[in-house]
Each structure stands twice: as C-alpha cells, then as structure tokens.
Image: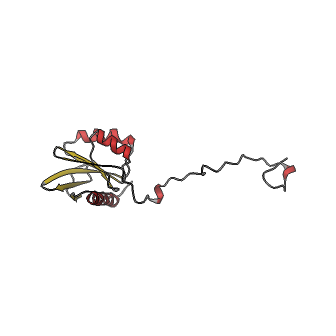
Amino acid sequence: MRTRKQEQEILRKAIEALERTTDLIVEFYTEIAPEGHDAVINIKFNDMEMHFAVEIKETFTHAMIGTVVQQLRKNKEKRIIVTKYVTPQIADKLKEVNVPFIDTAGNAYIKEPTFFIFIKGNRLAEMPNDKLQTRAFRPSQTVPAPCTARPKDKGKPFPHRR
C-alpha cells in the first residue's frame, strides 16, 4: 500500500519530467482534490489552461486499462493518470482509448480540442532495486542433474563417472 507521501513524490517527479520534456507549466494541488481523486493539476501553455483531476497509480499494467477506462467514463471531471512508468505498448493502448497520462520518465498523452501531446519511449533513469527482476540462472548456466548418494562413490570427486 502506498502512502500519501509516496503518491506526492510520484506526482512531483511526473510533473518535473513533463515540464522538462515540453514547454508546459504545470501546477498541482493536493488539498483541493475532489472526492476520490489524489490531486488536481493545471496545465498551462501560452494562453490555454487545462484542469485535470489526478489518479495516481504506482504501477500501470495492461490489465488495469479496462478498469481505468470504466472509472474515467463514470466521472464528469477530466481525469489524468499519473504513474511511475508507462511502457510504449501501454502508451499506445491508452492513446487508443483516449486516456490522458503522464509518468516520471517524461512520457505523456494529453488530447484536448486545441491541444495534443504524445510522448512515448522515454525510459526511467534508474529502476528501484526492489523492483528489479533477477533470473535464478543465466542462460548459459545449466542446472545439474540431481545425484543420489551411493556408498561405493563415497570420496570420489563429483560428478561420479564410471
């Protein structure tokens, strides 16, 4: 379970990444968020201003897309997903179903009548150690076959050869 502090850190990093990769000015407010939302963001570009209710997700997977689309359609407010990282495949799917998002790597999709932005393919600078997946064996390694103890092989070097 994520804490409020972790959510705000994800939001802050995602906003910094969006501002770094675009000329947008983004302000966020966590105190005035509508019921059921994590924050509100205002995105400014030239004389345009867009307001979004924020839904922060620590991770975002293909399996979550259908649920999120249903939640977005139930609410009247414009909503945006903020997450740590959106893969290029998920970014394409979110664009296809018109779900706005930003992530901490600088990827984003926002489509409004007079404004469009779609950035994908940026990678995270570093992956947290607790999220790294490791393999039990490298592809070049082989798993030794189980050996049984044989009294006559006692003291001989492994593997037992006849």
Q: How many marks?
A: 0
| Location of residue 98 with respect to 131 vertically, above or below | above
Q: Name the residue furthest right.
A: 152
Choose top left, top right, bottom left or bottom right for residue 23: bottom left
Q: Name the residue furthest left.
A: 47
134 lies left or right of 7: right
Q: Position of residue 150 (x, y in %)?
A: 83, 48
Q: Position of residue 145 (x, y in %)?
A: 72, 46
User: How are the residues colored?
Assistant: secondary structure
Q: Quadrant of the N terminus?
A: bottom left
For the residue pair 19 and 59, the one nearer the viewer reads as 19
For the residue pair 49 and 46, the one nearer the viewer reads as 46
The residue positioned 56% from the left and 51% from the top of the image is 135
Q: Position of residue 64 (x, y in %)?
A: 36, 42
Choose top left, top right, bottom left or bottom right for residue 15: bottom left
For the residue pair 116 and 146, the one nearer the viewer reads as 116
Q: Position of residue 93 (x, y in %)?
A: 33, 40
Choose top left, top right, bottom left or bottom right for residue 75: top left
77 lies left or right of 88: left
135 lies left or right of 69: right
The residue positioned 17% from the left and 51% from the top of the image is 50
